[in-house]
Image (cartoon, rainbow, N blue to C red):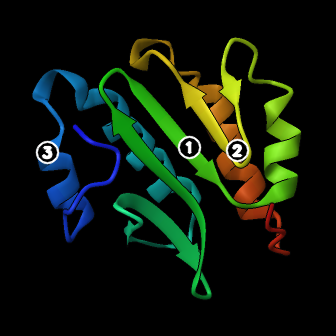
Amino acid sequence: MEMKSKAATVDEYFLEIPEKKVAVPAMVRTLCKEMLIGYEEHMAYGMPAYSRNGLVVLAFAIQKNQISFYQLKQEALKTNVALSQGMEPGKPVIHFDRLEEIDFELIRRLLMDIFNDEQVHFV
């Protein structure tokens, strides 16, 4: 699967993911929906994204065996990059190189920081 999908909806995006790889992104989507209350789920930049007041604050993409989180809230990223040992933090992206090694606790913390941070700070 390419990083940039042409899917019109998040449901269509998930139909593009091979069945054997869909469990991790499905869990990420579930966490986003549970924790980002008041955020809109939609496609942006060819990825599932979550926005509030018209601003995308998080998007994620599946590529072969990795998942990438594009985090646009600077404070949440700074807080959680320190917890991301073994990953490749970028600016403003966190990559998990192996789907089976994703740290869901880190994802929960990242989502909690996004939700709790009322001011949007872009990197």
Quarter where residue 99 is shown? top left
Question: How far is disc 3 from disc 2 in space, using C-alphas?
Answer: 26 Å
Q: In the picture provided, is 101 more to the left or to the right than 94?
A: left
Q: Are marks 2 and 1 in contact (CB under 8 Å)?
A: yes
Nearer the camera: disc 2 or disc 1: 1
Q: Residue at x 65, y 50 (%)?
A: 111
The residue labelled by disc 3 is 16
Q: Residue at x 20, y 71 (%)?
A: 8
Residue type at mark 3?
Glu
The residue labelled by disc 1 is 69
Nearer the camera: disc 3 or disc 2: 3
The residue labelled by disc 2 is 110
Q: Are marks 3 and 2 in contact (CB under 8 Å)?
A: no
Q: Earlier in the sequence, mark 3 or mark 1?
A: 3
Q: Earlier in the sequence, mark 2 or mark 1?
A: 1
Q: Earlier in the sequence, mark 3 or mark 2?
A: 3
On screen, residue 9 above or below 70: below
Q: In the picture provided, is 109 more to the left or to the right than 69?
A: right
Secondary structure of the residue carrying numbered label 3: helix
How many marks overall? Answer: 3
Residue type at mark 1?
Phe
